[in-house]
């Protein structure tokens, strides 16, 4: 047999090479002739100038923000173009990575995650939305699935409205971290989701930077709220009337329509099940925050303060549902407890103006933070999936690396999580890959790369900057003292952590991040980390009469009065969240998108070489290219590789006695691969050198599976149609049973209905659709129609030489569920008759089209001839037809059955050897037709002779009617018999994943899902999971024993007992069904 071989220098590989792009704009940076930062930057520039913003580094996708909409780049057609394609089959695109993620999740049944990284303004949020959109488009379309997808997509407008803002770097910057998990069943349809949010930038709420905006929702509500909402919440004067919005003097964003965004937000609220009251509570909370910002204070006597404008205080108190006096007191004074136990003493301390303003801002930030957390919980409740036991895709969209003119506590936290993301990228792509080669014994030369683990420990370790800050907060130290602790811990010492931090003065320090040096100002770090919410503020909020206060969790806050245990700091909570995120990401198969900002001014068609080079350097793209260039494109464990690809090697189709490594080698040998060239075997895994080889391997298995699917489809369709035509065959037999002699070949032949493949003929299909609805084609065959004209009625039989005037017309007879047709194909007579042969159009010449309701009967002889006379009612406007058809028993039987089904009328079938018919529509012209048995006539034929203007049919000798054995009669399956497929373990198996079953040799399992990608789903000892196909064999187990049928001999009953169960077994039907013996070729389709 021919052994297929993959040639890396031609064939499909040539197509792959052509898809890699030109030399100056390669699709994959691994293909660069010379690997350097300069060449990477130039290649990205060449692609950017051609509006090709995506580039690969192996499986890693590089995305350069175009700052514009590229026509036709994200259409529904583009989604269809990338759906189901191999990763390198089309140019790089975010849809290709999303499709690969979705396919890997389904095929491998493993959790996946997409990690999108890059600095602020690089396009991470838009990229995450494109991934969500693609996954939604390619998953199921049932009503329940569509509802889940609509809710998942509707979460984006809500979260962006309340968590995104315009910054100097990005018009729609995420000011919080978001990890969206989409939960799927094992078929790939979404069941629900889960959103986890990280560190909302609350400082922006009270002080957005110059040229920046606060969170989008404030402008959307102030500008696009309804008239009723603006009047109810006192927002009619617009955003410029509120201090929290006006201090940055930025109200509009190019490319963002606040009114349009507000309409989308309202629709999203409806989709996610927010009640109208809940929506208004959300808007009222937003208004509360805005009005709190307008509270101004003036200095009072001593170190006291008071509210400057009582009307503003009254509006705040009214919207919050609290007493104005109590609200003012909570802001202008603080209750301080000194001592503990019996020595505890409460003192009410007055706040000066700056302290009152700080208390006001603290309360505003707390209210908005509670609102945001409540919105996330509400979204999660709407999209939750209870008792989830499936697979998932996580999409991480988190704030990018930031370097501002003034960098504070928020920037340190944001940059810390970006350091951890860079660390996990290094661990899973650079370090892990090189360590795996060494562990597997694969020859490898180490490639150096920047490792930021010491810097992560500097910020988040013990001791680290955040832990030192917690100690400073808990011991009452100032920010300057905290900087002193940093100096004492690290300055003058050796090691990578000490080298990563530098103290410039008592209030500033510099951290050498992987993305560049950042100068932080220590002032305010302690207060932001402590995030103190005084008991007076909590008490005021808990006294509110508004329902949203309790709903948003204010009643759950415990006052600190008398509490010995300090609440966790913001830094400690954030470190815990980041640790959980990293743990969740490491449990998934990661896919990486590295976003790059081409310029700092957000200008389209502008590529700043210096800016891009800086990002290429700190993202480690050069090291990434080097590792991919020197390494292997694909690696898989022996067990999984054999499970997926063993069908390609016939030698492994039987029970091959050998190790998994030997099986892998046999598969590679069969497809013509050479060890050391296309692949290498490690200790537990196989390594494939080129991505092109992997794609060709996938193409080969896809062709093999397609061929197998066609075989299965053919078998199933044959089985399905076989039963249908066996039933029809028996009904046809009942029409002529014991009434007509039969020919031997007529008894044994198969029934197919359409013998001319007219179901594929466009002309015939057009004829069957002329009433606007397609008729069901039941029978189609050739016929020989005798043309009778009374006394001059003449026939011509081709083999008869003594009656030359007689005529026969060769036609097609077609029966549908509504009409009986007689026609022939002819050249179009309206065209030029002298045209060149082959250029004239073929048309249908229709002789009659008679409704089944106008057929009055059928006449057959008792002899073994092929003639059948069909009688029509006068309304049919056609004479009775005398025709010879080799399959007349099937035709007549189907005609009787069709009329019975359509009009519940029994069609008379007359068996006689003499009949008179009228052969003229204008006047009565009778012709007698008679039949005689003539032993001289050959089997399968008949001879017509003219006897005194009448017709005599000479029929051959056939099998007597009484001796004709009936065909098998199909009986219905006994529904009381329930058969469940059982599996028995041939080899022991230890499950490596949580959804894989472990078992020993001889264990018996119940299969609940058929094979999919080399795995069964089964149950064993009450546990459900997946088992590899090659480790088990099928055994039959009948839960209820059916009553055995009596063994019989001949006749209809005996034949039926012998019959259809064999066909069911052969074609995969259920045991216990009756049918025909497949050794006898009765009635296939």
Image: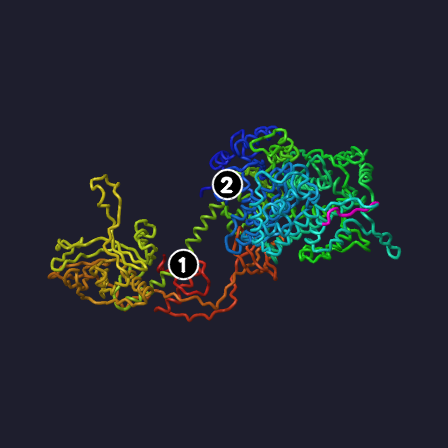
Q: Is residue 35 above or below residue 662?
A: above
Q: Is residue 91 above or below residue 885?
A: above
Q: Can residue 801 be seen in this snapshot?
A: yes
Q: Can residue 113 be seen in this snapshot?
A: no
Residue 843 rendering spot, x and y as whole percentages: 26, 48
Residue 273 lies in quadrant? bottom right
Question: Which quadrant: the C terminus?
Answer: bottom left
Label 2: few (<14), some (14–19) or many (≥20) C-alpha neighbours in 10 Å: some
Disc 1 to disc 2, how far (Cα)?
A: 35 Å
Question: Which quadrant: the N terminus?
Answer: top left
Left or right of 80, for residue 1031:
right
Secondary structure found at label 1: helix
Q: Residue at x 83, y 43 (%)?
A: 477
Q: Is residue 303 magenta?
A: yes
* Span shown in magenta: 302-310
Which residue is nearer to you in this view: 134 or 33? 134
**Residue contact at pointers 1 and 2, CB within 8 angstroms:** no
Which residue is nearer to you in this view: 624 or 740? 624
Q: Which residue is mark 2?
A: 696
Which residue is nearer to you in this view: 684 or 553? 553
Q: Is residue 202 magenta?
A: no
Left or right of 150, for residue 938:
left
Which residue is nearer to you in this view: 105 or 835? 835
Q: Is residue 113 above or below residue 987?
A: above
Residue 521 lies in quadrant? top right
Left or right of 1082, for residue 802:
left
Disc number placed over residue 720 in the picture, else none: 1
Label 1: few (<14), some (14–19) or many (≥20) C-alpha neighbours in 10 Å: some
Residue 869 rendering spot, x and y as whole percentages: 22, 62
State how the image is colored.
rainbow
């Amino acid at each position: 047999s021919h052994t297929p071989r993959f040639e890396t220098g031609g064939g499909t590989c040539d197509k792959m090479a052509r898809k890699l792009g030109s030399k100056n704009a390669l699709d994959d940076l691994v293909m660069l002739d010379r690997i350097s930062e300069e060449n990477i930057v130039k290649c990205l520039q060449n692609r950017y100038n051609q509006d090709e913003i995506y580039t690969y580094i192996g499986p890693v996708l590089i995305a350069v923000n175009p700052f514009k909409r590229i026509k036709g780049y994200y259409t529904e057609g583009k989604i269809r173009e990338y759906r189901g394609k191999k990763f390198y089959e089309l140019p790089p695109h975010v849809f290709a990575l999303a499709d690969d993620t979705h396919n890997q999740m389904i095929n491998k049944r493993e959790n996946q995650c997409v990690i999108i990284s890059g600095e602020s303004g690089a396009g991470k949020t838009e990229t995450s939305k494109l991934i969500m959109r693609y996954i939604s488009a390619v998953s199921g379309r049932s009503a329940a699935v569509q509802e889940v997808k609509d809710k998942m997509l509707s979460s984006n407008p809500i979260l962006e409205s309340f968590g995104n803002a315009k910054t100097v770097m990005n018009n729609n910057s995420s000011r919080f971290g978001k990890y969206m998990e989409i939960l799927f069943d094992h078929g790939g349809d979404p069941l629900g989701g889960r959103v986890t949010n990280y560190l909302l930038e609350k400082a922006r709420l009270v002080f957005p930077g110059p040229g920046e905006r606060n969170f989008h929702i404030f402008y959307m509500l102030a500008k696009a709220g309804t008239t009723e909402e603006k009047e109810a919440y006192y927002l009619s004067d617009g955003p410029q009337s509120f201090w929290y919005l006006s201090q940055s003097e930025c109200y509009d964003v190019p490319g963002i329509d606040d009114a349009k965004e507000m309409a989308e937000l309202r629709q999203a609220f409806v989709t996610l099940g927010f009640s109208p009251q809940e929506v208004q509570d959300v808007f009222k909370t937003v208004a509360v925050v805005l009005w709190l910002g307008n509270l101004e204070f003036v200095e009072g006597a001593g170190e006291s303060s008071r509210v400057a404008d009582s009307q503003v205080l009254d509006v705040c108190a009214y919207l919050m549902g609290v007493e104005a006096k109590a609200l003012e007191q909570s802001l202008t004074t603080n209750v301080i407890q000194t001592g503990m136990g019996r020595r505890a003493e409460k003192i009410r301390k007055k706040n000066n103006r700056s302290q009152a303003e700080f208390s006001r801002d603290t309360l505003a930030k707390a209210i908005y933070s509670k609102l945001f957390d409540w919105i996330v919980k509400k979204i999660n409740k709407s999209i939750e999936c209870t008792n989830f036991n499936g697979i998932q895709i996580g999409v991480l969209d988190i704030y990018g690396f930031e370097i501002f003119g003034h960098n504070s506590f928020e920037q340190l936290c944001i940059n810390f999580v970006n350091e951890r993301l860079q660390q996990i990228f290094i661990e899973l792509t650079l370090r892990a890959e090189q360590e795996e080669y060494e562990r597997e014994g694969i020859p490898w030369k180490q490639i150096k790369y920047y490792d930021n683990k010491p810097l992560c420990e500097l910020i988040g370790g013990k001791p680290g900057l955040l832990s030192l800050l917690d100690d400073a907060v808990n011991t009452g130290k100032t920010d300057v003292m905290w900087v002193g602790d940093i100096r004492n811990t690290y300055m003058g010492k050796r090691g990578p952590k000490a080298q990563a931090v530098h103290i410039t003065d008592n209030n500033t320090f510099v951290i050498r991040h992987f993305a560049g040096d950042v100068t932080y100002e220590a002032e305010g770090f302690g207060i932001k980390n402590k995030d103190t919410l005084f008991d007076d503020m909590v008490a005021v909020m808990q006294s509110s009469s508004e329902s949203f206060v309790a709903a948003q969790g204010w009643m759950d806050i415990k006052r600190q009065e008398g509490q010995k245990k300090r609440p966790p700091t913001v830094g400690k909570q954030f470190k815990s969240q980041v640790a959980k995120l990293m743990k969740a990401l490491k449990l998934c198969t990661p896919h990486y998108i590295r976003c790059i900002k081409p310029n700092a001014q957000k200008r389209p068609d502008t590529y700043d070489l210096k800016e891009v080079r800086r990002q290429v350097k700190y993202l480690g793209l050069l090291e990434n290219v080097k590792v991919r260039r020197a390494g292997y494109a694909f690696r898989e464990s022996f067990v999984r590789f054999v499970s997926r690809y063993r069908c390609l090697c016939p030698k492994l189709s039987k029970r091959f006695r050998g190790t998994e490594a030997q099986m892998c080698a046999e598969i590679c040998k069969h497809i013509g691969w050479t060890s050391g060239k296309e692949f290498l075997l490690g200790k537990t895994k196989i390594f494939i050198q080129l991505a092109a080889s992997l794609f060709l391997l996938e193409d080969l298995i896809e062709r093999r599976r397609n061929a197998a699917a066609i075989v299965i489809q053919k078998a199933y369709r044959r089985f399905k149609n076989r039963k249908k035509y066996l039933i029809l065959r028996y009904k046809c037999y009942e029409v002529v049973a014991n009434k007509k002699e039969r020919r031997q070949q007529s008894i044994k032949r198969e029934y197919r209905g359409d013998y001319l493949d007219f179901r594929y003929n466009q002309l015939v299909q057009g004829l069957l659709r002329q009433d606007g609805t397609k008729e069901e084609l039941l029978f189609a065959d050739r016929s020989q129609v005798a043309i009778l004209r009374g006394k001059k009625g003449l026939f011509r039989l081709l083999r008869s030489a003594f009656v030359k005037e007689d005529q026969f017309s060769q036609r097609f007879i077609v029966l549908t569920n509504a009409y009986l047709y007689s026609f022939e194909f002819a050249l179009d007579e309206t065209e030029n008759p002298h045209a060149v042969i082959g250029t004239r159009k073929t048309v249908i010449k229709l002789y009659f089209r008679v409704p089944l309701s106008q057929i009055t009967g059928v006449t057959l002889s008792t002899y073994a001839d092929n003639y059948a006379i069909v009688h029509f009612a006068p309304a049919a406007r056609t004479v009775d037809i005398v025709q010879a058809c080799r399959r007349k028993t099937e035709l007549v039987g189907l005609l009787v059955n069709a009329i019975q089904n359509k009009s519940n009328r029994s069609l008379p079938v007359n068996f006689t050897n003499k009949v008179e018919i009228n052969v003229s529509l204008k006047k009565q012209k009778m012709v007698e037709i008679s039949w005689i048995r003539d032993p001289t006539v050959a089997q399968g034929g008949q001879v017509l002779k003219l006897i005194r203007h009448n017709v005599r049919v000479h029929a051959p000798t056939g099998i007597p009617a009484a001796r004709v054995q009936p065909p098998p009669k199909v009986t219905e399956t006994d529904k009381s018999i329930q058969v469940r497929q059982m599996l028995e373990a041939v080899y022991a198996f230890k499950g490596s994943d949580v959804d894989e079953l472990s078992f020993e040799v001889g264990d018996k399992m119940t299969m609940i899902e058929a094979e999919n990608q080399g795995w069964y789903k089964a149950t064993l000892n009450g546990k459900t999971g997946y088992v590899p196909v090659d480790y088990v064999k099928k055994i039959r187990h009948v839960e209820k024993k059916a009553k055995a049928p009596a063994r019989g001999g001949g006749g209809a009953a005996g034949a039926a007992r012998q019959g259809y169960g064999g066909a069911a077994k052969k074609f995969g039907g259920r045991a216990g069904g009756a049918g025909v013996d497949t050794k006898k070729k009765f009635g296939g389709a």
